[in-house]
């Protein structure tokens, strides 16, 4: 059995963060270990408050796991503080965690900052160059590169910019182009662009989409599928999770991570 390590926040509503990551890993056949970086107090109406875990404790969690087992893949979510960003970068380097998928969780859907301003600069300098794959959405691309995405040419330009920052592979997600009929994600490997396309699902239940996609991508990489195949499978898994809706919250509910099991 392949092993995944998720370094992310705790979501009491269960739709995103550690809980979403572990659910996806389990459904896709991996054993999941986890490190909590923040307590993100939220429900389907949005983030109420986010409290970071002390960087020393984040390091202690990571090192305790890694002294016992080296994961086949690392998936990264919310870090919140520059200190946590530094800890993550140091641990990636020290333990040679080359196969990592970094979901750039910078801001919640209701606009709550999930990485401090100073932390963004640290993230660009320390973490982006260590990314095997980085998976920002269009809003996060703007924060990281200053490029406002209005067209596919902007998407390609931002992919190249993030690749120049050091990421080996870049995936810019197109889910925020809400006026389009298709949801198009774009992968760049430093030479070529590839797309994964699905019909746009009209649903309010989009909580945890970024976590879910990144975890599905990481799961397939851990199984030694190539990047391009993993990209397409993760896109298909996301489409299934969005189109097989479950109504369990009053606000913006979660993606249905369990759809493959028939639930």
Image (cartoon, grey):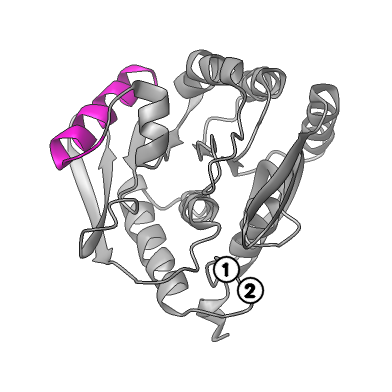
In the rendered image, the vertical position of residue 239 relative to residue 113, given as above or below: below
Image point 61% across, 25% down: which residue?
96
Image point 60% across, 19% down: which residue?
119
**Residue 84 location (% of width, % of height):** 70, 24
**Residue 161 location (% of width, % of height):** 28, 22
In the rendered image, the vertical position of residue 128 relative to residue 221, given as above or below: above
Residue corresponding to mark 2: 249
Q: Residues within 10 Å of mark 2 (few under 14, many from 20)?
A: few
Identify the secondary structure beneath mark 2.
loop
What are the residue bounds of the magenta stretch? 149-167
Instruction: Report the residue that reaches farthest toward the bottom.
Output: 262
Q: Residues within 10 Å of mark 1 (few under 14, many from 20)?
A: many
Quadrant in which the C terminus appears? bottom right
Magenta part, dominant SS: helix
Q: Is residue 74 magenta?
A: no
Residue 32 numbered mark, or none: none
Residue 253 numbered mark, or none: 1
**Residue 127 location (% of width, % of height):** 53, 22
Is 169 in front, or is 68? 169
Quadrant in which the N terminus appears? bottom right
């Amino acid at each position: 059995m392949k092993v995944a390590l998720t370094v992310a926040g705790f979501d009491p509503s269960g739709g995103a963060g550690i809980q979403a990551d572990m659910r996806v890993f389990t459904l896709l056949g991996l054993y999941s270990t986890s490190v909590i970086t923040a307590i993100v107090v939220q429900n389907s109406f949005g983030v109420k408050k986010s409290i970071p875990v002390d960087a020393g404790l984040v390091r202690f969690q990571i090192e305790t796991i890694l002294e016992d087992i080296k994961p086949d893949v690392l998936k990264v979510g919310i870090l919140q503080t520059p200190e946590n960003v530094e800890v993550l970068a140091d641990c990636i380097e020290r333990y040679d965690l080359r196969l990592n998928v970094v979901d750039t969780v910078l801001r919640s859907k209701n606009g709550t900052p999930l990485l401090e301003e100073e932390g963004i600069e640290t993230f660009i300098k320390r973490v982006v160059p260590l990314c095997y794959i980085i998976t920002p959405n269009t809003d996060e691309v703007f924060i990281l590169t200053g490029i406002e995405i209005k067209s596919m040419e902007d998407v390609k330009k931002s992919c190249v910019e993030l690749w120049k920052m050091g990421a080996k592979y870049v995936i810019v997600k197109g889910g925020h182009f809400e006026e389009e009929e298709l949801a198009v994600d774009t992968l760049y490997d430093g030479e070529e662009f590839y797309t994964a396309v699905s019909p746009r699902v009209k649903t309010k239940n989009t909580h945890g989409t970024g976590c879910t996609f990144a975890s599905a991508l990481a799961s397939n990489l851990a199984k030694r599928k190539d990047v391009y195949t993993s990209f397409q499978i993760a896109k298909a898994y996301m489409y299934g999770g969005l189109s097989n809706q479950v109504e369990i919250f009053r606000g913006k509910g979660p993606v249905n991570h369990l759809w493959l099991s028939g639930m």
